[in-house]
Image (cartoon, grey):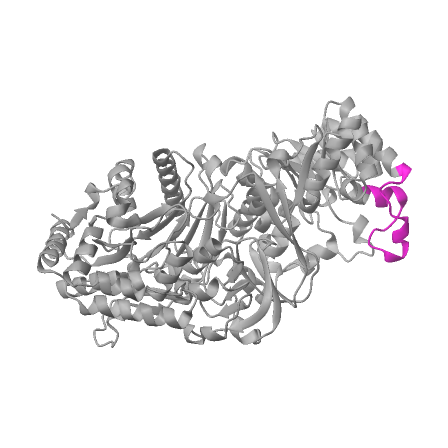
Amino acid sequence: MKYIKWFKELGINDVDEVGGKNASLGEMYNHLTPLGINVPNGFSVTATAYKYYLDANNLTDKLSKLFENFNPNDIEQLKIVGKSARDMIMQAKIPNDLKEEILKGYKELQKEYGDLSLAVRSSATAEDSPTASFAGQNETYLNIKGEDNLLWAYKMCLASNFTDRSISYKYTHNFDPMKVYLSAVIMKMVRSDKASSGVMFSIDTESGFRDVVFINSAWGLGENVVQGTINPDAFYIHKPTYKKGNKAVLKRKLGDKHLTMIFSQDKEMANLAEQFTKNIPTPIEKKMKFSINDDEVLTLAGWAMQIEEHYTKTRGIYTPMDMEWAKDGDDGKLYMVQARPETVHSQENQTNLEIYKLLEKSKVILTGNAVGEKIGAGKVKILKSMAESDKFNEGDVLVAHTTSPDWEPVMKKASAIITETGGRTCHAAIVSRELGKPAIVGVKNATLILKENQEVTVSCAEGEIGKVYQGILKYEIEKTDISKLPRPKTQIMMNLGNPEIAFSLAKLPVDGIGLARMEFIINNYIKAHPMAIKHPEMLSESERALIDELAFPYNGNSEEFFIKTLSEGVATIASSVYPKKCVVRMSDFKSNEYANLLGGRHFEPIEDNPMIGFRGAARYAHPSYKEGFELECQAMKRAIFEMGFDNIVLMIPFCRRIDEAKRVKEVMNANGLGNITTYMMCEIPNNVILIDKFLEVFDGISIGTNDLTQLTLGVDRDSQIVAFDYDERDEGVKAMVKMAVEGAKRNNKYSGLCGQAPSDYPEFAEFLVNIGIESMSLNPDSVLKTIKDIAQMEKQV
């Protein structure tokens, strides 16, 4: 055949003839189906066929003339040229010999699959290159049945080579629109309309963290995920632990999935392009459940790793991948339907660290899913459609219900982008990353709450949650070449409690995490008191209903919800430094803070001074909280043994007495944590005085300067009136720190310090270097400066 090639005839070296999508499908079909990866069969209508179509209809010269003296930044001219080009192609006829080959290929697929519907997809010859994905720039048509519909869909794909967005994208990425040829994919349609589908990346899309696979999923056909019309479910899987046999979901987030795209049976619709699919509201019970189960998540993650490894080996360079998948509701199987190189983080210099930091804060107006890690600011321009694009100026903040790739000409002029719908893997998010623009997607009611010409700052530099601040705020960009940083002998670790920022901090050159706090995870993700989980009979009806809602995605099992949520939050933090050490402090809420959790008021005492009250180790073996601590232990057991994070070290806070330490260890032993390395938070003078006895129970110490200072000096650190007396540099405090470090050395045990003092006071850091502490754990914003300072101090010592 002259004009079509089957997947079995194609590989990644055939991009010039069949485009990126076809070449990649052929590569997977030939090399990865033997490894168990399912790829539906199909064929390509080649670039040769495209050129033949233009030549047979005398269109090549006519189209070329449209682009003489063309200014891609003139949006009105872009609209006129784009429409003219598309009209020329649609009014032309498919040559008979080309038509016969396409229909013959269709009959062959019918022989293989029986009564099937087709996916007809565009595949441009510049598409899916390492520097430009062409994501969403050309059209796809789903549920195509019948010869006439197939031929119409083929012509529509050819015409989509000249959509306004595609033309603009080509000029942005320095492609001549007349030298990018259009091939078409014609393949078996996976019946995900009866199941679920989505996209996945073999890298974190925002931070570029290489150790995870990121999967988005929703009910029905995948166009809603790709186009950003819904907020999908999200899953992360950690590659290193998966590969050593610990196959578990690292992290998950339930999306609203408010629409489900299915096949349409309505043939009376006016627009032919809309005849084949339609959106319906997702039933509430499906909105509140994950759209794929853990086994399916793990299967997809394994495929993503195999695909990444294959492309990396084939291309001879590390190649993270951007992929699309679908589950067939008829046969229950998962299928890969696209794979292409990721085009943003794969191009980055891994030694250049660029950190955006807000220098001031204001009122947070709105939040959503952050795309990228940058900050932008400007005047709000609310666009309902591209028809309003003439009001948009360079540096404005684009606000819209959705920003499909059609909007690329406006997007590249924006300082930042805000949309009401979409997830991090939609086409608009991909284009935003390629353009280097900060974007926040899934911001509910943004077009109603924000006002035209209102000044705002859009921050994607604070983790997964993007924030829209009131006013134009000052920010800075800190640039560091990590390869040129000194590496001090003293270990520099970081403090971290928020899993949402873990991947973005993974690039910091630290020796591990010296303090991972559980409290953020419990407060922000679990929201319920651990004892309320154990004793729902103590709760009001409304409190039980709220916990039931939280547990609904876990088949209503509230204990499973608690254990999985806590273990996955802690494991996410541990993954960012794996296999380096991650010291996890068991929960250290005060009684008044516990009481603020859902159901907490039923289980907490009212104390005059919670700071030195019922907190830390005192709770863990106490009848009032022992069952809650057992839930924490089960979560840590899952994170360490089932999920494979053997870099986790547990730490017990506020342990007052030796007997208390032993009781806590007994409870840990009873819950399967007897052989886990366990440190004590050294923050009470008695910990220092009896350091040798405490270290008979624990494997090391981490000095908490905040509480050790307040208890040594007798200063309530929450009291403003005596704040002037609170100083970690006091000679008495330093004496306590020195005694603790010497005690650890004497017992051949680990010693570290977690607190802000070393970064706030260079002289305190120098004191720690002089006494030979093993590690200092700092807040992330202090790490780079402190590494330089400590290295210099060690030279002088």
Q: Nearer the viewer, residue 225 or 10?
A: 10
At 67% across and 63% down in the image, what residue appears?
473
Residue 629 in picture, x, y percent from top left = 64, 45
Residue 179 in picture, x, y percent from top left = 29, 54
The answer to whether residue 60 is left or right of residue 420 is: left
Q: How many marks?
A: 0
- Residue 381 falls inside the magenta stretch: no
Measured along the vertical axis of the image, is residue 25 above or below residue 738?
below
Residue 669 in picture, x, y percent from top left = 62, 33
Measured along the vertical axis of the image, is residue 780 above or below residue 393?
above
At 67% across and 32% down in the image, what residue appears?
486
Q: Quadrant of residue 31?
A: top left
Residue 281 in picture, x, y percent from top left = 38, 69
Residue at the front extreme?
Answer: 69
The answer to whether residue 533 is left or right of residue 413 is: right
Measured along the vertical axis of the image, is residue 315 above or below residue 545?
above
Q: Is residue 188 visible?
A: yes
The answer to whether residue 789 is left or right of residue 470 is: right
Q: Quadrant of residue 11?
A: top left
**Quadrant for the C terminus in the image:** top right
Q: Nearer the viewer, residue 478 or 621?
A: 478
Q: Nearer the viewer, residue 228 or 293?
A: 228
Q: Is residue 506 visible?
A: no
- Residue 717 falls inside the magenta stretch: yes
Q: Which residues are magenta?
A: 708-732
At 36% across and 41% down in the image, what residue appears?
303
